[in-house]
Image: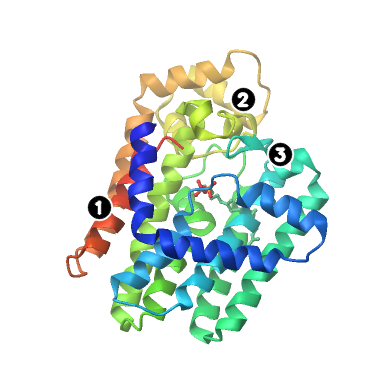
Amino acid sequence: MLNQSLALANIKKLASKDLNEMDLVINAKLDEREKLVQDITYHIINSGGKRLRPILSILSAKLFGYEGKRHINLSAAVEFIHTATLLHDDVVDHSNLRRGRPTANKNWNNKSSILVGDFLFSQAFVLMAEDGDIEVLKILSKAASIIAEGEVKQLYSIANLDLSIEQYMSIISAKTAELFAAACQVGAIVAGADESAKLNMYNFGLSLGKAFQIMDDVLDYVANDNSLGKNIGDDFQEAKVTLPVIIAYQRSDNFERVFWNKVIDIKLQEDGDFMQALKIFNKYNIIETCADIAKKSVDEAKACLSMVPKSVIRNSLMDVLDFCVDRKF
Ligand code: GRG
């Protein structure tokens, strides 16, 4: 955990000045707003989020030698979109703990979370409009639409034990990886990178985002509650079929499949069922298999980075990749 925090702190070093400026932009957008908007936004935005997506925008801009300021406001837009999705997601998932604190829906209520999420989402568009680049607007608005559609896809695959790995990858690509991809691409755009470099950064972010979400889904089963800042076992309780369950179900014998049908399909969960799921994971090396799949995405992301000239910033992006798969929070 300490090593992980150090790794993140190291990554943040190169971006820290810009991240501070981004925070000023975020705070300025909250000045003189409704008290509830401020309370909920400060509650979530100052609660120790990793800031991975704005870091990616900032580093991607620097990777191509950008020395201007546009990436500051645009990374704030990216973080606003991310924060809006978190507020909405916690309502959809009935979550009550995020970043080690009660979620906004728990502290206030669902309606307030949704509406403040809408406010933050719209502030992202204000920032993009102020920036005035239609290419950036296209990419981030497309990302927002893909994220929302990914969530809808996920909603309709809940409790579907026959979900394939390909279908799962398409869901996580939409709901999570797309914003990582857009964040990277936006950095390359403001820096004036050429078309192939912009696409390469998009692909880098997409692969990174997939690896990130796979590990997120793994951590939901095996993390240490205190370091994750969320409740472990939420996905199991919600009967959300993620990669560990998909592979475990595929490998299970008939007897074990009866168990999965009971806890996921019928959603009849009793004391000890979560432990039973972990036992089955253990028997079939599920966590290792998921980590291997994440590693494939990491390798794809590394291949994208290898097309960019060596630099301190490129090394730092490599570190982001390693952090995303090794992380405990
Ligand atoms: C408002 C565009 C819009 C859509 C709403 C509910 C919803 C539709 C989307 C949810 C998407 C979502 C939250 C996907 C999960 C991504 C994920 C694992 C987020 C956690 O990211 P971290 O760990 O968070 O980077 P921190 O706390 O570090 O910022």
Is the residue marked by circle 3 packed among few (<14), some (14-19), or many (20+) residues within 10 Å?
A: some
Q: Earlier in the sequence, mark 1 or mark 2?
A: 2
Disc 1 C-beta below 8 A from ligand 1: no
Q: Residue at x 67, y 41 (%)?
A: 93
Point out the frontmost of discs 1 and 2.
Answer: 1
For residue 54, above or below residue 69:
above
Of residues 202 and 106, the one drawn nearer to the viewer in this rendering: 106
Q: In x, y percent, where is residue 80?
A: 60, 62
Q: Residue at x 55, y 66 (%)?
A: 76
Q: Earlier in the sequence, mark 1 or mark 3?
A: 3
Point out the frontmost of discs 3 and 2.
Answer: 3
For residue 9, above or below residue 129:
above
The amino acid beneath tag 2 is: Val
Count of numbered labels shown in the rendering: 3
Q: In x, y percent, where is residue 296?
A: 28, 48
The amino acid beneath tag 3 is: His
Can you tell which mark lies on residue 299? 1
Q: Label 2, on which residue?
A: 263
Can you tell which mark lies on residue 94? 3
For residue 69, above or below residue 284:
below
Can you tell which mark lies on residue 272? none
